[in-house]
Image (cartoon, grey):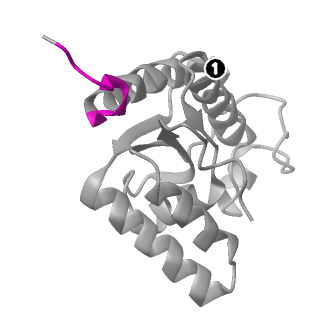
Amino acid sequence: MIELDPEKKPEAVLEAARLICAAARTAPKGRGKDLLVTAIIAGAVKSRLTRKMREIAARDDVQFFERDADCLDRSLVVVLLGSRKEALGLPHCGCCGFPDCAAMAAAGGTCTFNSTDLGIAVGSAAGRAADLRLDSRVMYSAGKAALELGLLGKEVRLAYALPLSVSAKSPFFDRT
């Protein structure tokens, strides 16, 4: 048997995406509270995401959403990483800018640890993608579009995307 170019098959990238999600899951979290939500999207769902990105680009005049949608078009799969919004209830904190969690919640704020923990998980995911020598790029734009589509559930309020590509030249490098 011979299998030519097996790395170009979606199954290979899907397996790598699962490993990337595992790396994000095991990242340290404030107070040990796991608020992370991960997803792997491809095919029709990825197309919905890129359509939403282009809609946002036109609607809100943010053209980099269009550019990033083009990059996702050249990606095999996209890993989504999000955080549910929940105060951790740490005493004597105030890192969010409010005196305590109750004041933060009343004002509709976000616990600093929600975004910090998500950032650490995204870094772990991007590091694992690099370890696997996959082309990737952390994208706020695709994360925002995923939130608008509700792809990670209603409780998720912060999200980033990590599109993955296996190609001779990274589609995320010479972006204009």
Front-most of residues 36 and 3? 3
Residue 174: image x %, image y %? 73, 53
Q: Is residue 114 magenta?
A: no
Q: Amino acid at mark 1?
A: Arg
Q: Is residue 127 above or below residue 54?
A: above
Label 1: how many Cα within 10 Å (few below 14, some 14–19, many 20+) = few
Q: Is residue 158 above or below residue 164?
A: below
Residue 81: image x %, image y %? 51, 41
Q: Which residue is mark 1?
A: 31
Label 1 residue SS: helix
Residue 156: image x %, image y %? 48, 51
Q: Is residue 154 left or right of residue 59?
A: left
Q: Is residue 56 above or below residue 127?
A: below
- The span shown in magenta is 2-10
Task: Give the residue displayed 84% in from the left and 30% down from the top.
Answer: 92
Q: Is residue 96 left or right of residue 60?
A: right
Front-most of residues 152 and 39? 39
